[in-house]
Image (spheres, grey):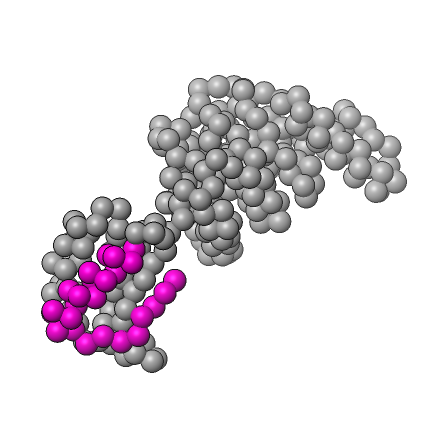
Amino acid sequence: MIGLIIVGDEILSGRRQDKHLAKSIELLAERGLKVSWARYVGDEPGMITAAVQDALAGNDVVFSFGGIGATPDDHTRAAAGRALGRPLVLHAEARELILQRCRQLAEQEGEAFDPDSADTQRRLQMGHFPEGSEIIPNPYNQIPGFTVAGRVHFVPGFPVMAWPMVAWVLDTLHAGLHGRGAEASRAVVVYGAIESRLTPLMLDIEARFPGIKVFSLPSVDHPVHGRHIELGVKGSPGAIDQAYQALLDGLIIFGASLGPEVVH
């Protein structure tokens, strides 16, 4: 499974709208994968540490967004170190990438590059990762993210940086997973039905077809269909047709009033 940790007080307060969940769903779907869970955490060191500890305790591939900068409210790097029980150390390759970026900025501003300046040393803090980490290249400004345990990945909160980095991780470190989460669904509009009365049919379909999930999406004020339930099945593309037909047969026996089919 693949999970997300999305860090930031600004998201929880509503000052910024999270875009990482929707984009992650898109990036994963392009590779036949899907998001299994997402966890939102504020800029609180203990909560971030707990979220990373939970990620490390499982077997999921996890992407953590945000909090890896060098400002006082960036706690994710230190939290990852605490979760692993490892010190933060300046990663050698990250150091070179950050110094290269600092040189570029100095040239752009027409200034002499000083590797010992306070500004350079502050930027180098962004290269301090838990001991043993691997870096994730950042094509936007060269300031890398990092990976621990081969499956828990830390990227910045800025979408312009984070999303290409996630794509790189998926294609470089987890190419073998591509296609494993491919899922299809088929559903039908059911008019005037009550979910509780359809529950036995839903349970029967799941029991008869392992790996198939039945979903029910009720609506009371749809502009076209009015009060209805979108009832369907989802699972691997080669397995849903038989389950869907069984669902339709059950609805006909039930005497349900059926509308159009919905294919996702």
Toward which corner of the image does residue 144 lie, by quadrant? top right
Residue at position x 21%, y 66% in the image: 248
How far across and down, in percent of the image, does residue 253 sit? 11, 69
Residue at position x 50%, y 50% in the image: 30
- Against 238, residue 228 (above or below) is below
How far across and down, in percent of the image, does residue 157 sit? 55, 44
108 or 230, which lies in front?
230
Left or right: residue 205 compared with residue 146: left
- The dominant secondary structure in magenta is helix
Magenta residues, start to end:
240-264
5 or 259, which lies in front?
259
Q: How many marks?
A: 0
156 or 74, which lies in front?
156
Left or right: residue 102 compared with residue 69: right
Q: Does the magenta portion include 63? A: no
Residue at position x 58%, y 20% in the image: 89
- Against 43, residue 254 (above or below) is below
Residue at position x 53%, y 33% in the image: 173
Which quadrant, please, contains the N terminus?
top left
- Against 58, residue 167 (above or below) is below
Q: Is residue 113 visible?
A: yes
Q: Is residue 9 visible?
A: no
Which quadrant, please, contains the C terminus?
bottom left
How far across and down, in percent of the image, does residue 168 sit? 58, 39
Q: Does the magenta portion include 257? A: yes
